[in-house]
Amino acid sequence: VDTAIDTRDHDLADAVADATGGLGADLAVDTVGAPLLNSVIAAMGFGGGICFLAARPETRVEFDPQAFYRRDLRLVGLNTTRMTVSEAASVLRPLVPAFEHGDLRPPHVAQSHPLEEASTAYSTVQNGTAAGRVVLRPQQ
């Protein structure tokens, strides 16, 4: 990670253009989904790739296909629900140093539930009522 951009403080495409000398991003990992996808597309450089790994089931996204294909972009979905915990950890492990050095910040955790309250946590996520991430804690 060369640059982390908080979209609450900056326009994503403008910040990426500033950080890359106008070239755009080579890779984006979109963990937000519909609200940011068009901004992510606008921030990409020629031949860039977008890994999309978050969307509520009812989410539909509209975007301009010309903005996408004229820059030869790639879109890849990563469905972590099809992975074991160990497989998911191996995908995320390379990000640890960026969090340790402060280059990446963890998302705001709105609620934390013990595993026994999984149905409550999932209902909160499905209803979209949490103002941040909802975390399940396994027994310690």
Image (cartoon, rainbow, N blue to C red):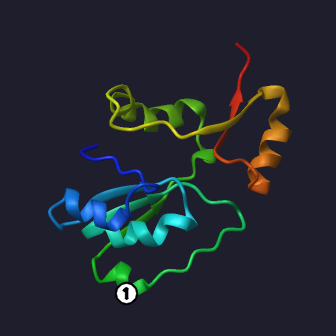
According to the picture, the residue beneath numbered tag 1 turns out to be 66
Residue 56 vs 61, above or below: the answer is: above
**Residue 110 image point, x, y percent:** 67, 39
Q: Residue at x 57, y 39 (%)?
A: 108
On screen, residue 7 above or below 39: above
Instruction: Tell me what residue is drawn at x 78 percent, y 40 percent.
Output: 121
Count of numbered tags: 1
The image quadrant that residue 126 belongs to is bottom right
Q: Secondary structure at mark 1?
A: helix
- In the image, farthest residue toward the front: 9
In the displayed structure image, the side of residue 114 where residue 27 appears, left or right: left
Foreground of the two, 72 or 99:
99
Looking at the picture, how far across and down is residue 42, in whole percent? 35, 73
Residue 56 picture quarter: bottom right
Q: Position of residue 75 (x, y in %)?
A: 42, 67
Task: Locate residue 34: give its quadrant.
Answer: bottom right
The residue under the point 27% across, 78% down is 71
Q: Nearer the viewer, residue 124 or 115?
A: 124
**Image quarter of the N terminus:** top left
| Residue 15 position (above or below residue 63) | above
Task: Give the residue type at disc 1.
Answer: Gln
Quarter of the picture containing the C terminus is top right
Residue beneath the point at 38% across and 64% down: 11
Question: Looking at the image, which is closer to me, 82 or 52?
Answer: 52
Pick out the residue farthest to the top: 140
Report the residue that reaches farthest toward the left: 21
Q: Residues within 10 Å of mark 1 (few under 14, many from 20)?
A: few
